[in-house]
Structures are given as C-alpha cells and as structure tokens.
Image (cartoon, rainbow, N blue to C red):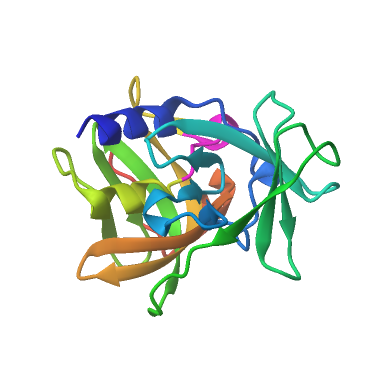
Amino acid sequence: MRRLAVLLLLVSTLPAFAADGDVPEAIQGRWVGEGEACKAATVVSATTLVYADGRIDDVVYSGEEGVFRIREEAVAYEYVEADDRLLFRPEGFGMGSAFPLTRCPEPVVATERRCGWLANLSPGNWSLVDADAVWTLSAAGEEGPEILAVMDMVPAFDPAEFVSTGTYTGYGCACMSVTTNGARISAIASTKREPLATCKADPSLPAIIE
C-alpha cells in the first residue's frame, strides 16, 4: 500500500517535461538486465522509470540522440531498434561501458487504443474518460501487484497541459494502448500525452465533472 501511495503522489507532482520529450511508445514497457528475472523489472513509461523496489525517477527523451535520461543526470538509456534492447550507460551517452537490458516478454493479449481525459480527481482514484466509458485505473484503497502494474505505466501530468482541481488532483489528455476488463483498464502497454486542446476539441468526449 505504501508504494502505491508514494507512486500516486509522485505521478501527480513530478516536474514533468513537455510531451515532445516523452519516451516513445516503442520503448515503453518492462526491462531487465541480462540474466535477471522479469519479476524484478524496471518499468519504462512515457515520463518515468519505476524500479522493482518502488523508486521512481523522472526521465526525458532526446530524439536527436535517441536516448532518454534521468532528469538532470548524465545516466543514459539508448534504444537499439534493430535488436529491441536498451543499453544502459551510467557515464552518459557514448561514454564508458554499456550494459544491455532486454524487454520482458508480455502475454499476448488484445489491446485497444483509447484516448481521452486522464483524470485523478480525488486521492487514489484514477480513470481514463473516453467516448465510450469511464475506465477505472485505480480506486482509493486498492493495492496489489495488478494495480501497481497499471499505475507504473501512467505518465506524469505535463504542468503546461494540466487542469488542477486541488493540491494533488486534476486531469490532462492522453492516449493509451490498453487491455480492458469490464469497466477497468487491466493493463497498459504504452501511453502518449496529448495537449488539452486535443481533448477539448473532441465532441465525443464528455466534460469532466470536477
């Protein structure tokens, strides 16, 4: 429960970068070093690294170099598309040793592309509101590995594209490739933050009731 509470707070308050610095969806997912078990994977989302022990680092992607970095650190993760692997470079891009990370295999399940309001309107309650439904990501008081696996992939809000409704609450606009189960999102494969204007201009989306 403590890890989820910390995660929810950090996702709401981390100083995020503009969406053009988000980690591309092709790189997002669960990664491990060679020989390591996927049970201890590091989760790469659009805006964060979530480690197996619950620590979270804010990251930004540089398209020019094809790497993403922990905020204000030299540490770099270089994506090698041909091999679908990451090279962890603790001394920075092009510097020193490179340690390969491999993608954890995920169960083959159908995913849906859903776009709409990413909302955290009260502590612990997260949802994606699209043209079809209000999809629950997590509810207050919930805990367990299934909830954490979903929330690890939720991107931080972009402060410039965020409507605040309270100290740690508000909503933004996002697209997600997800697996659904009833009215819940049971897994997130990747996400992309969108400008508020994109959701505001979509006549199929309901207004957020704050």
Residue 156 on the magenta segment: yes
Q: Nearer the viewer, residue 115 or 39?
A: 39
User: What's drawn in magenta, residue-wise?
Assistant: 155-162
The image quadrant that residue 106 belongs to is bottom left
Q: Nearer the viewer, residue 10 or 199?
A: 10
Residue 187 shows up from this direction? yes
The image quadrant that residue 181 belongs to is bottom left
Residue 207 shows up from this direction? no
Name the image quarter holding the N terminus: top left
Q: Nearer the viewer, residue 133 or 158?
A: 158
- Residue 149 rendering spot, x and y as whole percentages: 34, 52
- Residue 159 rendering spot, x and y as whole percentages: 55, 29
Which residue is pictured at 38% across the width and 75% down the height? 107
- Residue 51 rendering spot, x and y as whole percentages: 45, 40
108 in relation to 22, above or below: below
- Residue 34 rendering spot, x and y as whole percentages: 57, 56
